[in-house]
Image (cartoon, rainbow, N blue to C red):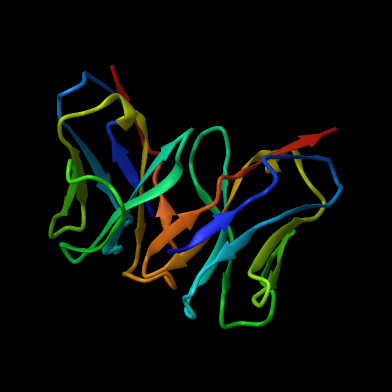
Amino acid sequence: KAGVTQTPRYLIKTRGQQVTLSCSPISGHRSVSWYQQTPGQGLQFLFEYFSETQRNKGNFPGRFSGRQFSNSRSEMNVSTLELGDSALYLCASSLASGSSYEQYFGPGTRLTVT
Amino acid sequence: AQTVTQSQPEMSVQEAETVTLSCTYDTSESDYYLFWYKQPPSRQMILVIRQEAYKQQNATENRFSVNFQKAAKSFSLKISDSQLGDAAMYFCAFGTASKLTFGTGTRLQVTL
């Protein structure tokens, strides 16, 4: 069974631009969560989507948004990029919503904002 | 809000020896899960072991085991017979309602 895939793997953007990251979960998984990893703030939860609905949200500004499609694929969008948005963005999929379900992580998208 | 504390930024262990990584957490939740994740240089997060808070028995997974002390809110990871492939960042995480709260990580070095 294929694992979680994230595209693109690397991205360089300029301040003020917007970016869209994509995550394809493991087949059959319906929940997708997004995390940001930076050297300063560590790993932080962004949001979780299950059955096309946002179920949980972390403490991030409204510039960070996401959505999930009927095939469970998810996208994350960051508008008006800031230098501090440079990070590794990880997505994780699980069978369903809830911590009793193991989260499987993708390889991440490395975003650099210049 | 939950907090997870890993007080050891770096640890070192000799191959074949045993090492214990510490983790404490703070929460008012009663229903939660605890996890240890490994992140090698490839940056791929890999689940090492998980513990359901309602279970008193400590979880074990081959060479990996935990010491879960619920009253003390402590959740340490013991790696036995350490191998070179165990070298990585290890993150302790608290899980509730699909949200994982991570500690700052412990970098484990394995020496010959």
Say whether residue B54 is left or right of residue B62: left
Q: Residue at (42%, 55%) from the top-left corner?
A: A104
Q: Nearer the viewer, residue A82 or A7?
A: A82
- Rendered location of residue B39, percent (x, y): 55, 42
Q: Residue at (26%, 64%) from the top-left corner?
A: A30
- Relative to A7, residue A65 above or below: below
- Rendered location of residue B105, percent (x, y): 59, 45
Say whether residue B33 is left or right of residue A36: right
- Relative to A95, residue B39 above or below: above
Task: Give the image quarter of residue B72.
Answer: bottom right
- Relative to B86, residue A73 above or below: below
Q: Nearer the viewer, residue A37 or B82?
A: A37
Q: Residue at (86%, 48%) from the top-left corner?
A: B17
Quadrant assignment for the C terminus of chain B: top right
Q: Nearer the viewer, residue B13 or A61?
A: A61
- Rendered location of residue B74, percent (x, y): 67, 66
Residue B32 can be seen in this image: yes
Say whether residue B3 is left or right of residue A92: right
Tell me how many marks there are.
Answer: 0
Residue A9 can be seen in this image: no
- Rendered location of residue A40, percent (x, y): 47, 34
Q: Residue at (30%, 52%) from the top-left corner?
A: A59
- Relative to B72, residue B112 above or below: above
